[in-house]
């Protein structure tokens, strides 16, 4: 029991020491400073920055912060970064209505909440938390980027009002269907890698889509991309695709990733040769390459002479 008490006292003293050092450091920040970076500063709580009256950007990355206390008074903030802390929820920031950038990635947040008043928010990052649902975003119509990768989300929902969204990242979740995307007409980048999707669908209204990443799913067929004529990058790697097809209308395509699939027919090069701006192709670890490793690169280069990169290697 005595040893446990000594250990507890030592931990408490170390924590106090860290906070004292952090407080001393914070006191050196000038009152007219606009950009404050306290990355990896061993902070256990949000420091008192009320004397920094013009603060616009606050970075508290890689600390040990467990709650939001102390942030509500920093109403001039436009950018707040809490990446890699110990937060379990989102609260006490309703007053930060000037925020246009918020990063709460690599925490333990279970629910998207208490941000509906942050109507000027343009970029929201919630990577690797414990979210199971997309919710409470209806008022954030100025959002242009939403990153929800590495969570526990099962359905694409609650984003229909995000009509200005240009980038949506949903990789490494548990999503089984592409749905509820029709109102996102300004979307340019859609990344939904490492999910449980079996079919490409629901993209007909995304006519401005330029980059589509759907690798590491269960896709068997490239289809339903006839309306996505502005696509420049298409990543369907690590799926179950046997035929390269469905690319007829993608005349602006520059990068095509189809590695680690089941493609074995060399006629695929005829289809790729019709794409006038194609510069990069990934086909490695398909039967096409595995069954003809000595002739693979030579055959591709002959069929696609304008190609600048094949797999990870430049063709020049």
Image (cartoon, rainbow, N blue to C red):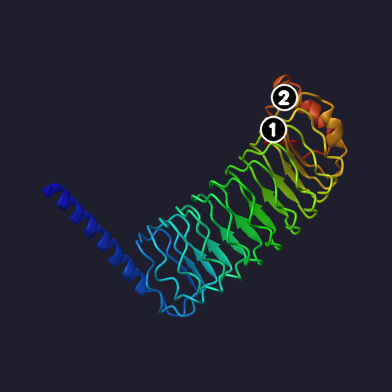
Residue 28 in the image: x percent, y percent? 37, 74
- In the image as oriented, which residue stretches furthest toward the top? 291
> Mark 1 sits on what residue?
259
Circle 2 crowding by C-alpha within 10 Å: few under 14, some 14–19, many from 20? some
Q: Choose the circle earlier in sequence order: 2 or 1.
A: 1
Residue 106 in the image: x percent, y percent? 48, 52
- In the image as oriented, which residue stretches furthest toward the left? 2
Q: How many marks?
A: 2
CA gap, disc 2 and disc 1:
10 Å
Question: Which residue is located at x 32 percent, y 69 percent?
Answer: 23
Q: Quadrant of the C terminus?
A: top right
Up the image or down, 305 lies above or below 231; here it is above
Q: Quadrant of residue 192?
A: top right
Up the image or down, 294 lies above or below 183; here it is above
The secondary structure type at the circle numbered 1 is loop
Number of the label disc, if any, that sits on residue 269: none
Instruction: Give the side of residue 146 with respect to residue 63, left or right.
Output: right
Up the image or down, 33 lies above or below 265; here it is below
The secondary structure type at the circle numbered 2 is helix
Question: Which residue is located at x 62 percent, y 43 percent?
Answer: 175
Question: Depth check: 245 or 255 in front?
Answer: 245
> Mark 2 sits on what residue?
289
Residue 165 in the image: x percent, y percent? 69, 60
Question: Which residue is located at x 80 percent, y 53 percent?
Answer: 207
């Amino acid at each position: 029991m005595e040893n446990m008490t000594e250990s507890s006292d030592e931990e408490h003293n170390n924590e106090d020491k860290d906070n004292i050092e952090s407080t001393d450091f914070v006191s050196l920040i000038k009152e007219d400073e606009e950009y404050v970076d306290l990355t990896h500063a061993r902070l256990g709580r949000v420091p008192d920055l009320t004397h920094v009256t013009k603060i616009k950007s606050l970075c508290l990355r890689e600390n040990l912060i467990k709650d939001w206390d102390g942030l509500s008074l920093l109403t001039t903030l436009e950018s707040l970064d809490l990446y890699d802390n110990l937060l379990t929820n989102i609260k006490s920031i309703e007053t930060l209505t000037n925020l246009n950038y918020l990063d709460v990635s690599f925490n333990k947040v279970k629910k998207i909440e208490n941000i509906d008043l942050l109507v000027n928010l343009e970029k929201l990052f919630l990577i690797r938390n414990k979210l199971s649902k997309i919710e409470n975003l209806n008022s954030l119509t100025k959002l242009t980027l939403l990153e929800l990768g590495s969570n526990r989300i099962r359905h694409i929902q609650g984003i229909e009002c995000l009509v200005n969204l240009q980038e949506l990242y949903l990789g490494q979740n548990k999503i089984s269907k592409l749905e509820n995307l029709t109102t996102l007409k300004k979307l340019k980048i859609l990344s939904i890698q490492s999910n449980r999707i079996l079919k490409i669908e629901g993209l007909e209204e995304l006519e401005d889509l330029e980059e589509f990443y759907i690798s590491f799913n269960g896709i068997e067929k490239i289809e339903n991309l006839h309306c996505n004529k502005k696509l420049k990058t298409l990543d369907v790697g690590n799926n179950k695709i046997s035929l390269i097809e469905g690319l007829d209308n993608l005349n602006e395509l520059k990068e095509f990733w189809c590695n680690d699939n089941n493609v074995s027919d060399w006629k695929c090069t005829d289809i790729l040769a019709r794409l006038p701006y194609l510069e990069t192709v990934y086909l490695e670890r398909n039967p096409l390459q595995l069954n003809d490793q000595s002739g693979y690169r030579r055959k591709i280069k002959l069929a696609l002479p304008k190609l600048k990169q094949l797999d990870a290697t430049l063709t020049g």
